Image (spheres, rainbow, N blue to C red):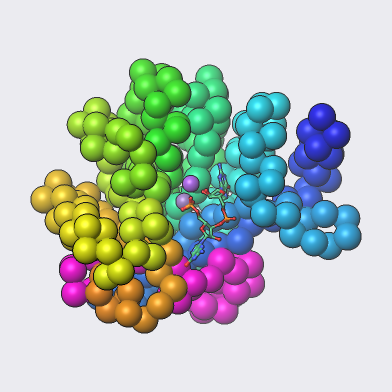
Amino acid sequence: LELQTELRQALAEHAFVLEYQPVVSLETSQVTAVEALVRWRRADGSLVPPEEFLGPAEESGLIVPLGEWILREACQKVAVWRATTGLDIGLSVNVSARQVLSAGFVQSVEEVLAESGLNAEALTVEVDEEVLLENPVVAAEHLTKLRELGVRLAVDDFGMGHASLSHLRRLRVDEIKIDPSFVRDLDADETVTLLTRTLIRLGQDLGVQVVAEGIEHPWQLRRLREMGCAYGQGFLVGRPMDAAGVEALVGGET
Ligand code: G
Ligand code: G
Ligand code: MN
Ligand code: NA
């Protein structure tokens, strides 16, 4: 409860900041998108990782206004970067269950797109399986409405849940993000190698974009390229960075 109060205050005092992690084409090594990642900057200057506050923010409902702030901040930034660079840079934003299920979710995304001028097609909303299991009917309704606006839908941490494949039956998905645990154990474990190859092939067959997450070592990058994985993310290909870091990377000035 102490933490809840602190978080509420942090939101009022604009103490949350976003970092952006590149998504790169494994074919060309070009940055195709950035994923917004929230951090909390405490009074002492330290950055608190989301694992430590997203749970409590979700429980208290603060995730709804916080999530809206994240979406607005990221869409505004990326709209400016697209305009100043002329590059077709996409934006991925993680959304939590409570946020997706909230009554005003679809409208808030629509408003943020209108305010920022960001093309709906440039925005990808990332959900994990928790989002899709808690209240599948309402989640599907809200996410389908987003897709009708042109927003892309990604399933995060794909392959880790119990029902990963069933989501592809029930929802139109534009992207799957292969969980880092697959990338980590590539080659060390023959089964993991085969499963990863199968997920990549599944994406190709369904026309769903595949992003491998957690690429840390050159051998992982090489193996994923050999397997035909089109996109990747990870410390090797791009660490989360602040907005100035993205501007330096893509050449945009603000
Ligand atoms: O950035 P980091 O590796 O610390 O992220 C840890 C977890 O927090 C990941 O599961 C990530 O999806 C989640 N996360 C990061 N930023 C956001 C955000 O802006 N909103 C939501 N809902 N989750 C986020
Ligand atoms: O659940 P989600 O995929 O949204 O989590 C994203 C988080 O994963 C980010 O907060 C980021 O800090 C972290 N991350 C990104 N790339 C790597 C990586 O190569 N290795 C590890 N260990 N974490 C990563
Ligand atoms: Mn994510
Ligand atoms: Na996630």
**Residue 188 image point, x, y percent:** 30, 69
**Residue 184 image point, x, y percent:** 38, 65
Instruction: Tell which residue pokes out farthest to the right in this image.
Output: 44
Residue 28 visible in the picture: no
Quarter of the image with the N terminus in it: top right
- Give the quarter of the image for residue 71: top right
Residue 127 vs residue 186, the one in the foreground: 186
Residue 245 vs residue 199, the one in the foreground: 199
**Residue 8 image point, x, y percent:** 79, 35
Horizontal arrangement in the rendering, residue 125 relative to residue 188 (left or right):
right
Horizontal arrangement in the rendering, residue 246 relative to residue 196 (left or right):
right
What secondary structure is the stretch in magenta mostly built from? Answer: loop
The residue drawn where x is 33% and y is 35% is 162
Please give the range of residues in magenta: 225-254
**Residue 219 image point, x, y percent:** 32, 79
- Give the quarter of the image for residue 99: top right
Quarter of the image with the C terminus in it: bottom right
The residue drawn where x is 16% and y is 50% is 202
Residue 13 vs residue 220, the one in the foreground: 220
Residue 42 vs residue 180, the one in the foreground: 180
Horizontal arrangement in the rendering, residue 43 relative to residue 241 (left or right):
right
Check the image and report above or below for 132 versus 138: below
